[in-house]
Image (cartoon, rainbow, N blue to C red):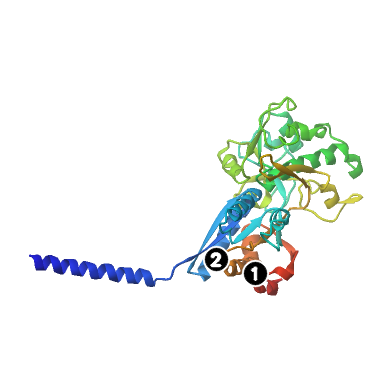
Amino acid sequence: MRDRIARIASIALVLILALTLVVGCAPLKETLTIYHAGSLTVPFDDLATEFESTHPNVDVLCEKGGSNSMISKAIMLEQAGESPPDIIASADYTLIPDRLYEKSYADWNIVFAKNKMVLCYCGGASYANEIQHRWEPPYTEEIPGGTRTWYDVLRNDSVSYGHSNPDEDPCGYRTPMVIQLAQKYYCDEATDFGLTPDSNADGLYDALIPGSEHEWGRVGGTSETRPGGSKEVVSKKSVDLIISIQSGDLDYAFEYRSVAVQHKLNFIELDDAINLSQTGKIGNTTYEDFYKKASIEIIKEPGPPPAYKTKSGKPIVYGITIPLHAENKELATEFIKLLLSDTGRNIMEVKNGQPFLETVMCDHPENLPALLKEVL
């Protein structure tokens, strides 16, 4: 009996040793960590799948959030002596030099994609059928609409409308800019563009985004400046609003057009003068100069006390970089090469409605990895 037990124990020991050797010989997977804007979630998930198919020993870990908050998280890792993500992709390319260059955490920035602001609405949104629509793809036929403006409804009727927090997310600080520009375009400076001033746009910013300087876009709720009883809802990041729109808990939300297309949301196209998408001439000025007339202060350093930086309106352009202290720079370089390739462009533009810039550029090409210098 003792011999039998000894033989069983010996066999078990051999099996354990064999399994240990097999596991020990198996190649360990590397992890490529990407912090990216929430609006890049769907296309970057597709890019990650494509990358893993050609790099079977790599796991791509994508973490999404408001661009400003993701950059803050990367900075906190650096300051704690930990490794930052391998890639940072921001919905506002200026956040990369503004926040990472001065700390010597990055030294180049590729601008690669663009977007525009739209107003999404749920299927049962009150008064949506009374709002004017502009017809652009992916619409295949005209959506029934009325003669009212979107800001007339948000200001004067009992509806809820949402946007993300300006301190967390570029879409959050772009929403107040859109509303400031709407007030200027449709009322304050309407005659400069050949328009008749609209009383519903008079004082529109204070009506839809109430509060003091550092409360704008953060406090939400109802306001006496909106006699119709509409409610402003502030979310931590713009993609969180999608669930509320899809469930019908929120009537309207300011989002990026690519996000609306990817999630098959109903949306209203905003005029080029206010949607932060254009370059070139508008009236006797340029879109860039007109967009600059809108601004908001956002938190640059959390403090205490918090330090603020003024963000002015400009066309929506995305940026991407590899932090100087990233662990997997070679893999990160290969991923960005995929992003900038024809395959990556197809995933972004054709599959997910996220338009690329006609010309992809870098502010400091001399600092790029050799593989990306070849691409650019």
Quarter of the image where one finds residue 373? bottom right
Judge by depth and name the residue closer to the eye, 187 or 137.
187
Report x, y in % for residue 80: 57, 53
Judge by depth and name the residue closer to the eye, 214 or 256.
214
| Image quarter of the N terminus | bottom left
Residue 153 in view here: no
Secondary structure state at the residue bearing disc 1: loop
Calculate the distance from the C-alpha at mark 2 to the C-alpha at mark 1: 12 Å
Residue type, numbered disc 2: Glu
Give the vertical position of 350 relative to 172 (above or below): below
Report x, y in % for residue 265: 62, 46
Quarter of the image where one finds residue 184? top right
Residue, x 31% and y 68% (percent of image)? 19
Q: Which mark is residue 237?
A: none
Give the vertical position of 262 relative to 362 (above or below): above
Report x, y in % for residue 264: 60, 49
Judge by depth and name the residue closer to the eye, 346 or 332.
332
Report x, y in % for residue 372: 67, 71
Q: As drawn, which residue projects farthest toward the left?
A: 1
Q: Earlier in the sequence, mark 2 or mark 1?
A: 2
How many other residues sit within 10 Å of disc 2, few (<14), some (14-19) or many (≥20)? Answer: some
Quarter of the image where one finds residue 238? top right
From the viewer's perspective, is 38 left or right of 10?
right
| Residue receiving disc 2 | 50
Judge by depth and name the residue closer to the eye, 215 or 318.
215
- Say how many tags the image has: 2
| Image quarter of the C terminus | bottom right
From the viewer's perspective, is 57 left or right of 213?
left
Residue type, numbered disc 1: Ser
Q: Which mark is residue 341?
A: 1
